[in-house]
Structures are given as structure tokens and as C-alpha cells.
Image (spheres, coloured by chain):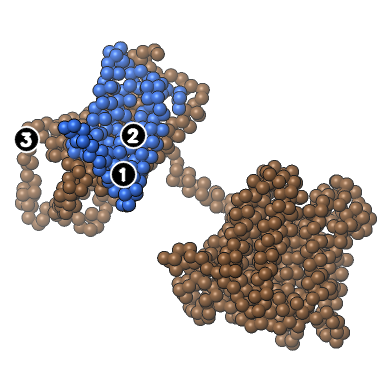
Chain colours: A brown, B blue
């Protein structure tokens, strides 16, 4: 059983790798074939329900980096099992649905690949116990959702939505990483199941809480990070149904629930979660009424629902947690169903605007039934899961203290608005007079109907078994979050004396009012938005464009393309590096004259050199002079070669034939290559320089030269440590069978270094070739032959 | 520069330089020399050939793309290090084989193979650059 948990997280990735192949082979049935993967995972997870109900948490552990005490540990308890079942169950229906929705799309195989990989990431996220593994899967969900949102990558809006979602959720991801590392530093374990109250009692609690909340709030689209979610609706509808209702956005809610035992239930936690959750709930609900596009309405209600879940987690009472669990399941079922219904309407009628849709119930009866099931759950009528969720929410707040009353009011208003939106979604498109649509509406294909019908029916079926719900969902779930199991108390019985019933009735009544006044509320809220002038969305754009402008400015400043200034910068840095540190560390003390000037004579002795050695130095100086005073570039290049040859001769005279050899070859090749480069420019005539340039370059050259000389003198004034050379000299022949120590070091003692170096040499060669090639391609119209041609007496080919 | 004398003599010089470069490369373990210097000499030889008879002709004479030669060099240098894994020693431990050929003994070793790899990389890379610069207007690039 243990290994199967890891399999649940890994199998979708394997399926993702095979998806394009399956799509190519099974063409129209690819969706049905690939749905088998989540289906079997669902069955596998279902078998875990019984042991989890018995109160056990099942864990599995695979070594990852054992040296760092790092394992891939997975854990299934009431919370993760609820999420995992939702992900695999809805995932199965979504895969099926996608096959029909994107039928004939050229990149359907790729879509399946992204979708299954996302599912694997999500399952890994909810199953992992290790914080680092959790972070990895968390980021994987961001990346795969980026690919899914931007699936239709030819549209600019899709690309923008994808980038926005990635940027926002990744900011949170970084927070999660910081939080994970902080927790590890505080407690010495990556496993969340091993954590107790250490984090809460440590001085770093504020920081850890802040970064974890950042992660959860960005992922779950809480205020003020809510704006990416509506923009993510640029994704194909199946993606919206899966990621943006049932799974990814719930990741933040899951994280908060998962961290509650060791991070939650403090004053700061409750205050932040309740306030921001409540604000998000109201903001999302108002936003939903403002929209007329079905998908946008659903996106906004998702924001509201996420706010509601966060609020409940913030309350943290047993009733609130069981309400959260019930609401999560109810919401996942009805919201995924509604997105699928919307996709079907869009697919068959050609529009999603509720103001131009009407009377679809006649032509799409099955879709209408599915929509009705989902909407009734959203309104929270009896015999749906939504009803229990709502009752449970109100249950914990029945007191006379003002914070409870305020929270209750927020919940009531929020729920009422959501109910109103649900009525809009159900009644406007499907009932009333038939309006003509861009496409003639007819029933959607079966694969697109299975999902919403099954999900809607599941909500009803679950609600008629309240005892089982209590046992299978509430008890293990609250045990995982709170550490204590709440016994099942859900009941279908109607009791007129129960104030909860009247709160529900008030919600429905208010909801109906919202439905009636939707048009007026829409106008009002749009006017408010116009008056506000800007939104978080436009602020995001401003920040992104500002970033681009800033990096452009930095690039223009540093990467200006003026070779002269690059060289000046390089040499100024060289001079500073040579002179500065030694001056600061008093390194030149050995070279400077002391108080009595007489020491100079002791230091300045005429070197004792042979005639030919003087000759070599004269040659070097001659070359130097020729470089400085030559009239054209060719002479300067050759003179530079003379100077280098003299250096090679010095090496030869002082016992480094290898070095001399190499120096000579490098000099020859530099002259050849420089000359070849220069023939492409102007070889003759040096360009005339301003006096300022001459002074600047001359000073720089002198400082650099003096710096190198002083540096070498300081080095030589120290004693020579010959341990390494002695070792090499002693071992070269017996160990490496070679008399040439230089070569032995290169190919034997330091062979790995040399291997790296020759790889770099080859890489540089490829880069140079690419540069020359791109230049050659750009100059397709041949440049006019330079004037130099006749003077060089070039023989015509 | 491109005189008839140069063009006539160039192939001879190139041939001598190439033989010399191979000699310098192979004797490198005991005398001044080695793969790096040998490669540089051979690259100079190709540069001379390119100057005398044009980059195209030099390329034809090489038969192989110089960049491919460089890549091959990296590969055989790396492979020579892998051979030691068969003897159970760490990567790049040298293996020596002394072939008895009548009166003389010819030592063959993995460092020698490695040095040949270095030779090919240096030769291939520098030759690529030199020939690319010599060919006017990017022909054959």
C-alpha cells in the first residue's frame, strides 16, 4: 500500500509523456483512453478511504537526497485524501470532456500532456509531507498551469494571462521556499507531520506566517492578488473547469489547512485570514454581478468562494473547519460542472454572454439539467451538498458577540450574492424566450455531458447520506486539520425552531433580490469601477512595463555597443585591481625607499645580462616603439608580433622552451588573425586621435603597465614555494612516464582541467563562427570594395 | 602577399608544417611540445594554405569541417579518460601499454590519446576561425 501512494503522484507524469502518442494512435477516442489513468488513480485512492476513516494516516517514504536528510515523503490523511479524490475524480471527467471540447485541435496531444502533468503536480502537492517536495510540486502546478493558460499561444490575451498567473503565483512560490527553509532551520525537519508548536513559539513566527500566507494568497487569488484569476480565463474552458475551480486555486486553501496545526490559531492568523477572506468574498461576489460573460461570472464567484474558504480557515473552529471541508467538496463539484456547462453552451451556441442567450433549455435539455443541479447546489437548497456547507458555516457563529455577528453578516451577504449569481446563470441562458445565437444551439456530444451530470448527481447523492458524509469526510478531515475528530451531526431533518433554517431562508430571499436587481447592481458597480480609475490589473501592467523600461535603460547604459568605452572600462578596472589592493595592503612597502634615500642605490642595480640578452630586450623595445609610432595598422600588427617574439625568446633563454614555443605560435596566429580581421576594416592609415584620447589611453596604458610590473616585482620579492614543482619533478617520470613536466601536468595530473579547457575552446570557436555567420548573413548586398584593394596589389582571382 | 612564388611554395610549407606539428604533438610527453602547440602549428599551416589558395581550397583540402574535427577532439579526449573505468580506477587514470616491436619499444598510453584530442580541438577551432575570416563575404560559412 505504501508504494502505491508515490505511484499516484508519479503515474500522471508517465501518462503525460505518452499522451501525444496515445492521441496520435487513438485519435477520436484519446480522451476516453487517457481518462483511464485518473480513473484508476481514483479507484486506488478510494481503497484508502476505509483505513483513513479508521483514523490512520498512511505514509510512504522514498529516499531523495539521503545525505541531506531529504526524503520524498507522502502522507494520506483525511485532508489530503479529500483533495486527492477530488483532483483525480474531476480530472477524469475533465480529460474526457477535453477530448470532445477540443476535438480536431491540432495540438490536442500536447494539451493532454499538459493537463496530465498538471494533475500529477497537483496530486503530488496534496500528498507530500515533505515541505521541499511540496514546494517542488507547488511550482510545477504553476508551470503547468502557465502552459495550459497560454495553450492558445497565438492570442496575445492568452499569453498575457499566462504570464500574469505565472508571475503572481511564483512570487508566492518564492515565499513558500523561504518559509520551508525557515521551518527547516527552526525545527530540523522537512516533514510537516513531525512539526509541533516550535514554529509558533519561535521569534521567527511572524516571518514564517507572512511568507506562507503570501504563498497561499497568491495561489488562491485572495485580495490583492485576485486579478490573475479572471485573466486566466483565456485558457480553454476545460482548463478553467479543472484548474480554476477545483484544483490549483484550491492549493492555497489546502496549504492553509495543512499548516493550521503548526502555524494557525493565533491572533494574527485569525485576523488576517478572516479580514482578507471576507473582503475577497464580497469583492468577488460584486465582481460576478458586474460581468455578463458566463465564464467571467464564474471566475469572479470562484474568487468569492476562495475568500469564503480562507475566512472559514481563519475562524478555525470545529464547525468552521467542517464547513470548509464540506464547502470545498460542494464547490469543486458544482463549479467544475458549471464551467463544463458554460463550455458546452459556448461550443454549441457560439456565445457566453447571458444578455444575448435565452431559452436554451429546449434545445439543450441535458445541459440544462446539469446546470440546474449545479446551480441549486450553489444556491444551497436542501438536498444538495451546498446546503450542508452553508448551515455548517452559520453554525459556529451563532453567538451574540460582535465579531461573530459581523462575520455572520459578511457570510450571509456573500452567500446571498453568490445565490443571486447562480440564479442568473441558470435562468437567463436557459429559460425565458428563445433568442437567436451565432450558432444554432443543439445538444453537446456525450463526452461533454458526462462530466456535469455526474458531478451534479454526486452532489445530490452525497447529500442524502449525511451520516456517511460525517464519517468519511468530516471526521478524518477535522482530525487532520484540528487534531480532533468532529462527530457527524449532519441531518436531513427540518426543524422550524432552528435559527439556522431561518438564516438559510434569509440567504435565499436576499439572493432572489440580488437576482431581480442584477441590472441595477451591475450599473452601480461598473460606475464605481470607472470612478476608481485603476485596478490591480492595470497596476500589474504598469509594474511589468516599468520593469521592461528599467531593464532597457540598464542595458543601454551597460551594453552601449561602443568598443572604445568597453575597452576603457576593462583597462580602468584592471588598473584598479592591480594597484588598489596592493596599496591598501601595504604591498609595495618592500619596493619603496626607506627614510635614507641611499637605499635606492642598493635597490637599483644594473642587471647582469649577457649581450644576446640585451639584444632580446632591445628587440622588444624596438617592437614596442614600432607599435606606437607606425603609420598604418598592418605595420602596427606586425610590430606587435615582433614584441611578442622577443618575449618568446626571453622564455627560451630562461629555460621554458614549452612556453616559448607556445608563445611564438600564439604570436604568429594573432598576427595572422588580427590582419585578417583588419582587412575587413581599413588596414592602412591609423585613425587620427584627439589629444584628449591620446592622453587618456596613454595614461591608462602607463598605469596598467606600471601596475603589472610592480605586481610582478612584489611577487618576486617573496620567497618561492617549490613544494609543488618538487613533487612534479620527482614523480613525473615514475608515475606519468614523461620527462616534460608541463605536458605531464596538462594531460595527466590536471587532465580534467584540460578537458574542461578544450571544451571551452571549442565552445568559443562555435560562438565566433556564429557571430561571423550572422554578420555574413546581414551583409547580403555586398559592401562596396574598400579603397585599399588597388594599393595592396591584389591579384584578381 | 598573394604572389605566384608564395602560391607555389605554400603547399610544400604546409606539408612540412603538418608533419612537424604531428611530430611536436607526439614527442610532447618527453620533449618540448604537445597537443596544444602541435595544434597551433597545424592551424597556422591551414591559415597559410588559405592565404595562398583561398579559403575554399583549404576547406576542400581538409575534407572535414574543422569544427567537426574540434568536436571529435573533445570526444576522444573524454573517451580516453573513460577507458580507465574498465580497469576499475577513477576517471582519467592513465593506462600505459608498451608495444615490443623488434628492437624498439613503443609506448602507447591514454594521455597520448588525450593529447591527440587536445591537438584536434585546438587545430579545429583555430582553423575554423582563420578560414571563416579568410573567406570573403561569408561563402561556405
Name the element at disc 1.
Answer: helix
Name the element at disc 3.
Answer: loop
Q: Which residue is mark 1?
A: A754
Quarter of the image for residue A94 reads: bottom right
Q: Looking at the picture, how far across and down is residue A326, in whole percent?
A: 73, 73
Q: Nearer the viewer, residue A82 or A386?
A: A82
Q: Give the chain of mark 2.
A: B
Q: Nearer the viewer, residue A464 or A304?
A: A464
Q: Looking at the picture, how far across and down is residue A616, in whole percent?
A: 14, 32
Vertical arrangement, residue A187 with respect to residue A284, above or below: below
Residue A322 appears in the figure: no
B124 to the left or right of A100:
left
Given the current orientation, which residue lies at the most extreme right position?
A: A433
Question: What residue is drawn where x is 72% and y is 61%?
Answer: A90
Name the element at disc 2.
Answer: helix
Quick one: label 1, few (<14), some, or many (20+) residues within 10 Å?
some
The mark tally for this picture is 3
Q: Which residue is mark 2?
A: B120
Q: Which residue is mark 3?
A: A610
Amino acid at each position: 500500500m505504501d508504494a502505491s501512494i508515490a505511484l499516484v503522484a508519479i503515474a500522471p507524469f508517465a501518462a503525460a509523456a505518452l499522451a501525444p502518442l496515445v492521441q496520435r494512435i487513438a485519435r477520436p477516442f484519446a480522451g476516453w483512453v487517457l481518462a483511464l489513468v485518473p480513473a484508476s488513480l481514483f479507484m486506488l485512492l478510494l481503497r484508502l478511504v476505509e483505513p483513513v476513516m479508521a483514523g490512520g494516516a498512511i505514509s510512504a517514504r522514498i529516499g531523495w537526497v539521503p545525505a541531506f536528510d531529504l526524503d520524498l515523503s507522502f502522507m494520506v490523511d483525511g485532508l489530503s485524501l479529500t483533495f486527492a479524490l477530488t483532483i483525480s475524480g474531476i480530472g477524469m471527467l475533465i480529460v474526457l470532456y477535453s477530448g470532445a471540447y477540443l476535438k480536431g485541435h491540432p495540438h490536442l496531444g500536447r494539451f493532454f500532456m499538459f493537463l496530465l502533468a498538471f494533475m500529477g503536480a497537483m496530486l503530488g502537492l496534496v500528498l507530500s509531507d515533505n515541505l521541499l517536495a511540496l514546494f517542488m510540486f507547488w511550482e510545477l502546478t504553476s508551470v503547468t498551469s502557465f502552459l495550459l493558460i497560454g495553450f492558445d499561444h497565438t492570442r496575445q490575451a492568452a499569453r498575457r494571462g499566462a504570464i500574469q498567473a505565472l508571475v503572481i503565483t511564483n512570487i508566492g512560490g518564492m515565499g513558500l521556499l523561504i518559509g520551508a527553509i525557515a521551518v527547516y532551520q527552526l525545527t530540523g525537519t522537512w516533514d510537516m507531520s513531525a512539526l509541533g508548536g516550535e514554529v509558533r513559539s519561535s521569534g521567527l513566527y511572524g516571518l514564517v506566517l507572512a511568507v506562507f500566507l503570501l504563498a497561499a494568497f497568491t495561489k488562491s487569488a485572495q485580495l490583492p492578488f485576485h486579478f490573475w484569476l479572471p485573466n486566466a480565463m483565456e485558457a480553454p474552458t476545460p482548463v478553467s473547469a479543472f484548474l480554476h475551480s477545483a484544483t490549483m486555486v484550491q492549493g492555497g486553501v489546502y496549504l492553509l489547512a495543512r499548516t493550521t496545526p503548526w502555524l494557525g490559531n493565533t491572533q494574527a492568523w485569525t485576523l488576517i485570514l478572516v479580514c482578507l477572506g471576507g473582503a475577497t468574498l464580497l469583492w468577488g461576489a460584486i465582481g460576478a454581478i458586474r460581468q455578463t460573460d458566463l465564464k467571467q461570472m464564474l471566475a469572479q464567484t470562484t474568487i468569492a468562494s476562495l475568500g469564503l474558504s480562507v475566512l472559514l480557515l481563519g475562524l478555525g473552529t470545529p464547525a468552521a473547519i467542517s464547513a470548509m471541508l464540506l464547502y470545498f467538496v460542494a464547490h469543486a463539484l458544482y463549479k467544475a460542472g458549471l464551467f463544463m456547462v458554460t463550455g458546452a453552451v459556448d461550443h454549441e451556441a457560439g456565445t457566453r454572454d447571458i444578455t444575448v442567450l435565452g431559452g436554451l433549455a429546449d434545445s439543450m435539455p441535458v445541459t440544462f439539467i446539469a446546470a440546474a443541479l449545479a446551480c441549486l447546489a450553489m444556491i444551497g437548497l436542501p438536498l444538495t451538498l451546498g446546503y450542508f456547507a452553508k448551515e455548517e458555516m452559520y453554525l459556529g457563529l451563532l453567538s451574540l458577540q460582535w465579531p461573530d455577528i459581523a462575520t455572520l453578516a459578511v457570510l450571509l451577504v456573500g452567500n446571498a450574492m453568490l445565490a443571486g449569481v447562480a440564479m442568473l446563470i441558470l435562468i437567463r441562458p436557459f429559460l425565458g424566450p428563445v433568442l437567436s445565437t451565432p450558432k444554432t444551439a443543439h445538444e453537446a456530444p456525450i463526452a461533454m455531458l458526462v462530466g456535469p451530470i455526474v458531478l451534479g448527481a454526486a452532489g445530490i447523492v452525497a447529500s442524502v447520506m449525511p451520516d456517511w458524509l460525517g464519517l468519511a469526510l468530516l471526521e478524518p478531515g477535522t482530525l487532520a486539520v484540528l487534531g480532533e475528530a468532529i462527530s457527524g451531526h449532519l441531518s436531513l431533518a427540518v426543524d422550524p425552531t432552528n435559527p439556522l433554517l431561518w438564516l438559510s431562508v434569509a440567504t435565499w430571499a436576499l439572493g432572489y433580490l440580488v437576482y431581480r436587481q442584477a441590472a441595477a447592481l451591475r450599473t452601480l458597480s461598473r460606475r464605481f469601477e470607472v470612478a476608481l480609475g485603476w485596478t490591480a490589473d492595470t497596476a500589474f501592467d504598469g509594474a511589468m512595463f516599468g520593469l521592461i523600461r528599467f531593464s532597457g535603460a540598464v542595458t543601454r547604459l551597460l551594453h552601449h555597443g561602443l568598443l572604445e568605452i568597453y575597452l576603457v572600462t576593462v583597462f580602468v578596472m584592471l588598473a584598479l585591481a592591480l594597484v588598489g589592493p596592493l596599496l591598501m595592503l601595504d604591498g609595495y612597502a618592500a619596493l619603496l625607499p626607506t627614510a635614507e634615500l641611499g637605499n635606492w642605490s642598493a635597490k637599483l642595480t644594473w642587471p647582469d645580462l649577457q649581450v644576446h640578452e640585451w639584444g632580446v630586450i632591445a628587440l622588444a623595445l624596438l617592437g614596442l616603439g614600432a607599435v606606437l609610432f607606425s603609420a598604418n595598422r598592418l605595420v602596427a600588427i606586425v610590430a606587435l608580433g615582433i614584441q611578442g617574439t622577443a618575449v618568446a625568446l626571453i622564455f627560451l633563454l630562461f629555460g621554458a622552451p614549452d612556453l616559448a614555443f607556445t608563445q611564438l605560435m600564439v604570436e604568429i596566429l594573432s598576427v595572422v588573425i588580427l590582419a585578417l580581421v583588419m582587412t575587413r576594416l581599413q588596414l592602412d592609415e591609423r585613425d587620427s586621435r584627439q589629444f584628449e584620447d591620446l592622453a587618456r589611453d596613454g595614461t591608462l596604458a602607463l598605469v596598467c603597465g606600471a601596475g603589472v610590473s610592480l605586481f610582478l616585482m612584489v611577487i618576486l620579492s617573496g620567497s618561492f614555494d617549490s613544494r609543488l614543482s618538487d613533487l612534479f619533478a620527482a614523480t613525473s617520470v615514475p608515475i606519468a612516464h614523461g620527462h616534460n613536466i608541463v605536458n605531464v601536468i596538462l594531460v595527466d595530473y590536471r587532465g580534467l582541467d584540460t578537458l574542461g579547457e578544450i571544451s571551452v575552446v571549442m565552445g568559443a570557436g562555435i560562438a565566433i563562427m556564429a557571430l561571423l555567420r550572422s554578420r555574413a548573413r546581414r551583409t547580403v548586398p555586398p559592401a562596396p570594395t574598400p579603397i585599399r584593394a588597388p594599393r595592396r596589389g591584389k591579384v584578381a582571382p | 602577399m598573394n604572389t605566384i612564388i608564395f602560391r607555389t611554395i605554400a603547399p610544400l610549407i604546409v606539408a612540412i608544417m603538418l608533419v612537424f606539428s604531428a611530430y611536436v604533438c607526439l614527442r610532447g610527453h618527453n620533449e618540448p611540445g604537445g597537443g596544444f602547440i602541435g595544434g597551433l602549428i597545424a592551424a597556422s599551416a591551414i591559415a597559410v594554405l588559405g592565404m595562398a589558395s583561398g579559403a575554399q581550397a583549404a576547406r576542400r583540402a581538409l575534407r572535414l569541417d574543422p569544427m567537426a574535427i574540434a568536436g571529435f577532439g573533445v570526444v576522444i579526449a573524454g573517451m580516453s579518460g573513460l577507458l580507465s573505468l574498465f580497469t576499475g580506477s577513477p576517471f582519467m587514470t592513465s593506462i600505459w601499454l608498451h608495444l615490443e616491436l623488434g628492437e624498439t619499444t613503443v609506448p602507447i598510453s591514454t594521455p597520448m590519446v588525450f593529447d591527440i584530442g587536445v591537438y584536434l580541438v585546438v587545430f579545429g577551432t583555430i582553423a575554423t576561425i582563420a578560414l571563416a575570416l579568410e573567406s570573403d563575404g561569408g561563402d561556405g560559412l
